[in-house]
Image: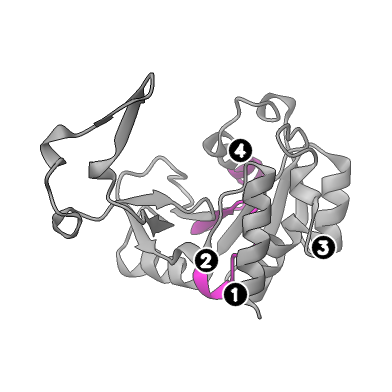
Amino acid sequence: MANLAIIPARGGSKRIPRKNIKHFLGKPIIAYSIEAALKSGLFDEVIVSTDDAEIANVAEQYGAKIVLRSQKNSDDFATLADVIEEVKNQYISNKIVFDSICCILATAPLITPDIIKKGYTNLEENNADSVRPVVRFAYPIQRAFKLDEGKVSFINKEHASTRSQDLEPAFFDSGMFYWMRFELGLKGTNRYAFEIAEMQAQDIDTLEDWQMAELKYKLNNQ
């Protein structure tokens, strides 16, 4: 099976400036995604899609190839699907196709080769269109509150007296990677997911998220 890893990494991060190459415990955060992809042994090519020369230089130092991103897909409104389709079209125009793609986020330092492999196994065994790792909500979302000028009430009043253990577990996207069929990208409807522990993932949007990711990394690797 021919597999392609795509790591999107544009240069215009605002909440954490230069986030994709900011040093995380001693090396650029994007290096963790590149190294995990390479060490998994699953990919014929590991590429970084970027509009930024410095990001491209760092990515090449850690073993990735570079696909330059168009200006259209370099602003705040470009989606992962847009970036994936752009990379696909560049390969197709050169008469190169793959069986599967794994889109790996550049800010996923807790990623490991084993988690990537588990996702690929899930994709193949279920004949899925796409697969992603998810994390279980620690508290049942059915018993969530809302605040109206300080006044508290249940969002779902029907569960006000339901025991937590009787409610169906809910999950959220780990923000780590997405396996998918090359021909479908993220458009497929036969979607699967597999659960990973909360300690194995951390979405990074703020400096507090960054600090939590560093703490989790240290605890996972002590």
Instruction: Specify start and end residues of the magenta stretch as a single range.
Output: 86-115
Name the residue rendered at 71%, 44% in the picture. 9
Label 1, on which residue?
220
| Closer to the camera in the image, 33 or 154 | 154
C-alpha span from label 3 to label 4:
25 Å
- Marks 3,4: beta carbons within 8 A: no
The tag earlier along the polypeptide, 3 or 1, is: 3
Residue matched to label 2: 200
Q: Quadrant of residue 113?
A: bottom right
**Mark 2 residue element:** helix
Q: Answer yes or no: do the residues labelled 3 and 1 have beta carbons within 8 Å?
A: no
SS of the residue under disc 4: helix
Q: Label 3 vs label 1: CA separation?
A: 17 Å
Vertical position of residue 15 compared to residue 57: above or below: above
User: Is the C-beta separation of discs 1 and 2 under 8 Å?
Assistant: yes
* Contact check, label 2 and label 4, Cβ < 8 Å: no
Q: Position of residue 221 (x, y in %)?
A: 64, 78
Q: Amino acid at mark 4?
A: Val
Tell me what residue is drawn at x 41 percent, y 58 percent.
135
Query: Which mark sits nearer the N-terminus, 2 or 4?
Result: 4
* Amino acid identity at mark 2: Gln
Residue 80 in percent (x, y) is at 56, 39
**Which residue matches tag 3?**
27
Identify residue for label 4.
83
Q: Quadrant of the C terminus?
A: bottom right
Q: Is residue 175 visible?
A: yes
Q: Is residue 158 above or below residue 55?
A: above
